[in-house]
Amino acid sequence: MLVAAGYEPLILAHPKLSAQVFPSEQPVLRPARVDIWTWCAALNVFLITLCQRKPLLVACCLTRRKLWVGSLSRTLKGSRGVILLHNDFDLMSRAAIGQGVATVCVQHGVPTDEFFPTRADWYLVWGDNSRAAFEAQLGSSTQLVEDGLGRGSKPDVALTSPQGISLLSQTHAHVLGNDIYQALNDFAEALLERAPSTRILLHPLEVKPYAGAAALATRRAPHPELHAKADASRLVVGYCSTAMLEAALAGHWVVALQLSLQGNLAARSILAAPLRAKTAQQVVDLYQRLREDVVFRQEMTEAQAKWLRSSFSTESGGLVGLLERIEQQSSTECLQ
């Protein structure tokens, strides 16, 4: 997209990422080494934090932040243009903010609690639902721009009678609550008792999160039902996963699981699909009704299509338009 618009992107790559993960035709820049003065300042931060009787983990994080800021200050010194971030809360991304270059954060998933408060100058959100969620949480001067990045250009997805149930697993995601592991294990067990052919779709970061029958029902990524139209629609159940939107775009029914966990209101508002369930039995009941009740199936088809339209903007060019505005503003300031 950026190349087609006439831009020449430069990838600022984390030191631990292999060059092989980047397109060979794209130039890659690595962060500059930290100078001795930054090392001394970071050591000072570490000692002061420990003297304040803060946990060692906090001291290490603050020290690493100081090192990142020093590194990127040297890396970006004298730079012009725009920095595109995939988030604005990890140490490297935060250190890139405030270095004299405009920052644009591109929404890379549903905004769980660590997304807030936002820190980038601009935030590119997917559509109406995301804009509303971000506006409800914003406590900074971050400005929002919508761009579905091509997702909203797809026609309404045709849904057929579901031919199986899939459960999106994310037991590793502690940001969803300390009880997420047990909650999903309990739900998976109850669902398998009522629908033994259920598939449990593991997140790539999960390592053997289930035992017994649930372990046998797990499937490792990649998951075809999340990325391409399969031979038949399935009923995909998820709590707070971006994969719920991927499944809907791929032509599958989506059920928003209503777990009794606190927090992540923004993400849950975006993922409030028309079909919702609190219990395994309710999921099975929805599955049977979608298979047997033609009128209900048609009503839910229209409702899910409306939800998707609200999720992804049909307007194209939001990102490119924003870059042009920033470029013009920068040029004007240089002339003054």
Image (cartoon, rainbow, N blue to C red):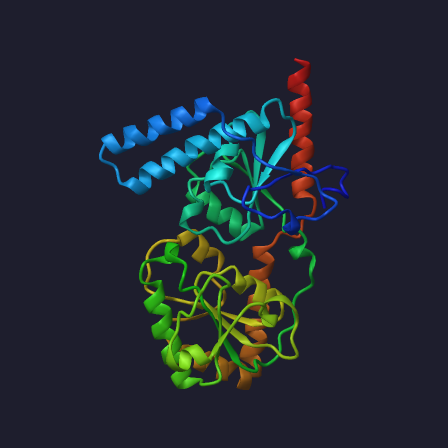
Can residue 141 be seen at all in this image of the molecule? no
Residue occupying the far front of the picture? 36
Q: Between residues 21 and 35, which one lies in front from this camera angle?
A: 35
* Residue 2 versus residue 181 in the image, above or below: above
* Residue 287 versus residue 252 in the image, above or below: below
Residue occupying the far top of the picture? 336
Q: Between residues 256 and 50, which one lies in front from this camera angle?
A: 50
**126 horizontally vs 49: left or right:** right
Quarter of the image for residue 61 reads: top left
Please state the horizontal and vertical placement of residue 190, each as a whole percent of the image. Answer: 36, 79
Please state the horizontal and vertical placement of residue 34, each as a whole percent of the image. Answer: 50, 29
Can residue 249 be seen at all in this image of the molecule? yes
- Residue at 69%, 56% (x, y): give it: 153
* Residue 104 versus residue 239 in the image, above or below: above
Quarter of the image for residue 194 reads: bottom left
* Residue 98 versus residue 107 in the image, above or below: above
- Residue at 35%, 38% (x, y): give it: 60
- Residue at 65%, 56% (x, y): give it: 151
Please state the horizontal and vertical placement of residue 13, each as a whole percent of the image. Answer: 59, 41
